[in-house]
Amino acid sequence: MLSLIVLLPLLGFLANGFWYMSQLKKEHKAQASHVGALGTAAIGGSFLVGLICFFRLLAMEPEHRVLEQTLFSWIFIEGLHLDFAFRLDALNSLFVLVITGVGTLIHIYSIGYMSHDASPGKFFAYLNLFCACMLVLVLGASLPVLFLGWEGVGLCSYLLISFWYTDDEKASAGKKAFIVNRVGDFGFLLGMFLIFTTFGTIDFANLKMVVAGGGVTPEKLAAVTSICLLLFVGCMGKSAQIPLYVWLPDAMAGPTPVSALIHAATMVTSGIYLVSRLNFLYTLSPDAMLFVAMIGGLTALFAASIAIAQNDIKKVLAYSTVSQLGYMFLACGVGAYVSGVFHVITHAFFKALLFLGAGSVIHGMHEEQDIQKMGGLRSKMPRTFLVFGAGWLAICGIPPFSGFFSKDEILWQAFSSSRSELWLWLLGVVTALMTAFYMSRLFILTFLGEGRWKSHGHAKHDKHDHGPHDHGHAPKDAHAHHGGGEPHESPWIMVGPLVALAILSLVGGFIGIPHMSWLEHWLEPIIPGFAPIKDGVHHETEWVLMGFSVLIALIGMGGAFFVYGSRARTEKLQNSLAGFLKTLENKWYVDEIYDAVIVRPLRVVSMFLWKKIDVSIIDRTVLGVGSVSEMSGGVLRETQTGSTQIYVVTFAIGLLVIVGYALYGLV
Amino acid sequence: MNVPVVQPWVVLSFCSAIFFIGLAGVLIRRNILIIIMCIELMLNAVNLTLVTYSEMLNDLNGEMAVFFVIVVAAVESAIGLSLVIAVFRTLRTVDTDSIQSLRG
């Protein structure tokens, strides 16, 4: 049963992949609606199986809520017996539902979005493969199986970011994502090895048993801290935290549904999954947890600050994603794993909604991504406007939208948890303010006010003035049939999934209402509640803080309306802050710093090794050996004249010499 | 009856003279047919030497070896001549100077 969840998308991948390959030489490729229907059926079937499994879990006793399936014996050597096994429990059943559910909606949306693409078959094949890998990641019963999925999603991320690989910028964005992730994976591997040498097992259930059974002696405690930190390095890469977050904004070069599915809803949350899966280890190490919380909080603030000044609609959302992921790690770091998982779920809903909404805007604006050239789309794209508004309110944290519940819970935990510090809470609050501000800015500039596309965009909309904002557009002929240039509403096949996600963003928060949280209760066998609250913090404070965080969100939104409501005021403010905004727009020059500190020294060293060591020494040695034999061969070949009689002369002389030696010896 | 006896050294000198004539032919001549004939000459000079020593040493082994050499020589010339014919058919020449395709 469990393997079916993974198998269906895998079959979808194989079917679409072979179909695509069989058509490589043909002029007319299969239509997006056909391959898309196949891909959607695969992931939709997986969702249904996931639902069935989920209901089976619901029917069980809370302590025994586990479904397990062993496929085969994977590694069988001295001291290590590892099965390739899937295990479904309270925690990853939620992830399975989110991945397959949101995945299905995004597949449907992609049918519309990729309808003009040259090779939709390849796209849907990759998308299915990604889903299969992601499901292996969350279903894996042991670290190596998880790691298999972990690498698989990395590969699919690379393939899909550079989906339009003929564009150099997109191809290198894919490479960047892959290489930065390698750094994190290295930490993950080391952490896995250390777990094995310390505890002798890498199966989650066994590991938990060993730890719960007092397997952690004081001597092993140091190793636990190292394990947690090393695994967190892996999470930094996959979940885009400081200092390895740089790949995620560039990953927006991929098609927009990919950004929604991989780089917002699912893959980037696998770090949070790993940390909450191993919460029993992290809880043992306050140092590692503080580090996780610190990185999370700093990333949240830092990415939010960059998002304020970005003009590419997808870049804003990308930095917003980095920032929200920071929130989730902040929650995990203060011992509120439940809140982290809660935010993963709500974030999957509203961020997928925002990305797909942005895709709809980009689609309707004829591949325009610069929000400075948008505006006034409310009347042109009313349906997209409404659903995007739902996502906007959700991420700002306005009740009763889902983002409010999860974000408020994280802030409350950061304030009250005995594992937290006050400055972590302050980081969270400032980030919440900035989130409300930049999302409102995005919303205002895109949908409200005057349409700036009349003056800027479409008169000279001839694909030449795109410059650096030309990310993630569909192929060039995508809108040939539209002729004009008016923004237009997207077809229902794209808006339908948006509506579904908007409803989920609205109601998704109700699974975690404070003090009657279904989620907390559900996760109890895996995550034993929250950390105890600090001394001197009263429960009544929670209600005060809840009001406070709504107030913060309203201030942020109000600020954005104040600044961006009138064009004159915007320009005046932009002029007075020009220098600072430039720094923000250039992302604090982090890419430039990385380039100067890491990339360029590496290139200098590599050039030295190549030109000096490799070419001058190693190559010369090897080539020298070669030329010696070449020269000696050149000399010796002269003896091979091909003339039989010269051979005979040589033979005769040799014979005479031998005979002479036999008769007279060495004279 | 006094039969004149040929002294062994006369025969041996004769043999070595023939042998070196054959050798010189092999080394100098350019026509393959002549070369094969010269090889034949060398072989028969050796045969004669063997017979002479057999007589001198009163040992029949030498004469026995001669028969072997004759057989081998017959085989050799059969193969050699057929090779010559094959070479001539392909290259239209039997001149060793023009048959040097194995030059290194």
Image (cartoon, helix red, strand yellow):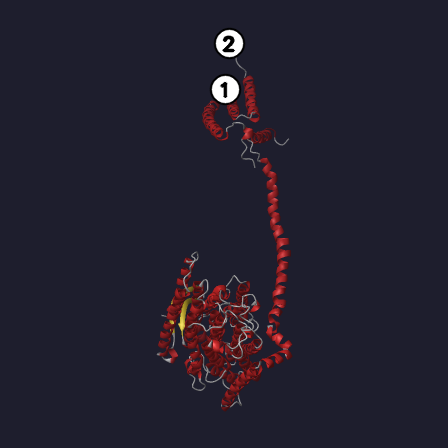
Residue located beneath label 2 in the image: B2
Where is residue A493 shown, x and y percent of the image? 41, 72
Looking at the rendered structure, the kind of residue marked 1 is Glu
Q: Please say if A215 is above or below B82.
A: below
Q: Please say if A354 is above or below A156.
A: below
Q: Earlier in the sequence, mark 2 or mark 1?
A: 2
Q: Nearer the viewer, residue A241 or B3?
A: A241
Where is residue A660 shown, x and y percent of the image? 60, 29
Looking at the rendered structure, the kind of residue marked 2 is Asn
Residue A463, numbered label? none
Name the quarter where the C terminus of chain A is drawn.
top right
Where is residue A478 shown, x and y percent of the image? 47, 66
Q: Report the Cα–Cα distance between label 2 and label 1.
A: 19 Å
Horizontal side of A7 relative to B77 (left or right) equals: left
Q: Secondary structure at mark 1?
A: helix
- Whether residue B48 is visible to the viewer of this picture, yes or no, is yes
Disc 2: which chain? B
Residue lying furthest top in this view? B1
Residue located beneath label 1 in the image: B55
